[in-house]
Amino acid sequence: MYDALKEEEIVKKVGGRFKLSTLIQKRLVALNAGARPLVENPSRDKMMIVIEEILGDKIYLDMENNVQVADGPSPDAPPELDLANL
């Protein structure tokens, strides 16, 4: 189990449990599709990468529930997967 998910800090940071779940799921899809991690994690555990990105204020959900990178996309990163048009 991921201890960070048991804490209220991460829930409050994102804006609720539903938004947290949505952000985690969408970011995992993007990572699995080839997006580059925004944090260094030697274990290469994608769930831990997403948790670290959230706690480090690297990613967030915008008003339309799309994953956004806090500093904007890096020019060499592959585009995020758009699930809205599936």
Image (tube, rainbow, N blue to C red):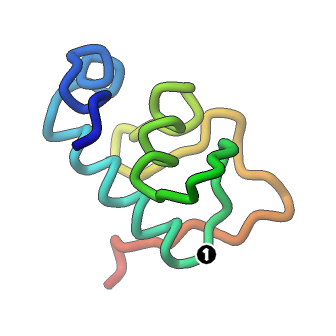
**Is residue 79 or residue 12 the one in the foreground?**
12
Tag 1 residue: 34
**Is residue 36 or residue 85 the one in the foreground?**
36
2 vs 83: above or below: above
Q: Quadrant of residue 12?
A: top left
> On the rendered structure, is 82 left or right of 10?
right
Q: Position of residue 29 (x, y in %)?
A: 41, 69
70 vs 77: above or below: above
Q: Position of residue 83 (x, y in %)?
A: 36, 73
Q: Quadrant of residue 85?
A: bottom left
> On the rendered structure, is 12 left or right of 52?
left
Q: Residues within 10 Å of mark 1 (few under 14, many from 20)?
A: some
Residue depicted at 42% across the width and 39% down the height: 51
Instruction: Please count the marks in the image.
Output: 1
Residue depicted at 62% across the width and 67% down the height: 35
Q: Position of residue 57 (x, y in %)?
A: 54, 26
The quadrant of the picture occupied by the N terminus is: top left
The quadrant of the picture occupied by the C terminus is: bottom left
Residue depicted at 49% across the width and 74% down the height: 32
**Is residue 71 or residue 50 the one in the foreground?**
50
Residue depicted at 62% across the width and 34% down the height: 70
Under mark 1, the amino acid is Gly
Q: Quadrant of residue 27?
A: bottom left
